[in-house]
Amino acid sequence: MTLETLTEVAGELGLEAGPIINHMNSAEVTDVLGANRQLAETMAIQGTPTFVIGSELLRGIPASGLAPAVEQIRNAEKG
């Protein structure tokens, strides 16, 4: 998303883009993104979407949908 698009979307929602952009570029957000990236590297997550369900990593969304995959993993972990 470009800053122009962000500004447009914010306006459509009745929001001011300036504060959003300032927060987006803040050290707080940069730190959170860095921590998330580090966690993803630790968990060997290399792409999105990746879902952590119990102790399993589900990479992508199966053709059958997300809900059946989550149910199957949860049932398998229950034993």
Image (spheres, helix red, strand yellow):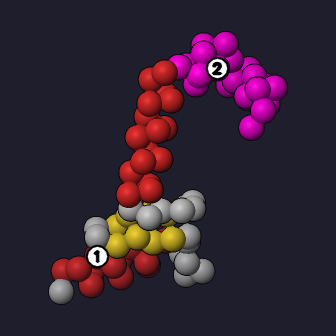
User: Label 1: which residue?
Assistant: 74
Could you tell whether 79 is left or right of 34 in the image?
A: left
Helix or strand or loop: what does disc 2 sit on?
Answer: helix
Instruction: Answer yes or no: is residue 14 visible.
Output: no
Question: Is residue 60 visible from the viewing direction of this image?
Answer: yes
Q: Is residue 29 left or right of residue 11?
A: left
Up/down of 52 relative to 6, above or below? below
Determine the residue located farthest toward the left in the rendered image: 79
The amino acid at mark 2 is Ile
| Coordinates of residue 15 in the picture (x, y in percent) | 65, 17
The quadrant of the image that shows the C terminus is bottom left
Residue furthest right as drawn: 4
Q: Locate residue 41: give its quadrant.
A: bottom left
51 vs 64, nearest the viewer: 51
Q: Which residue is mark 2?
A: 21
Q: Number of labelled discs? A: 2
Q: Is residue 25 magenta?
A: yes
Please give the name of the residue rendered at 38% of the width and 57% of the height, measured from the top-left corner.
42
Residue 23, by quadrant, is: top right
Name the main secondary structure of what is drawn in magenta: helix
The stretch of residues the image draws in magenta is 1-26
Q: Position of residue 21 (x, y in %)?
A: 64, 20
> Residue 34's mark?
none
**What is the spatial separation of the Cα atoms under label 1 and label 2, in whole angstroms?**
39 Å
Task: Name the quadrant of the N terminus.
Answer: top right
* Mark 1 burial class by Cα count in 10 Å: few <14, some 14-19, many 20+: some
The picture places residue 39, in percent across and down from the top left corner, at 39, 51
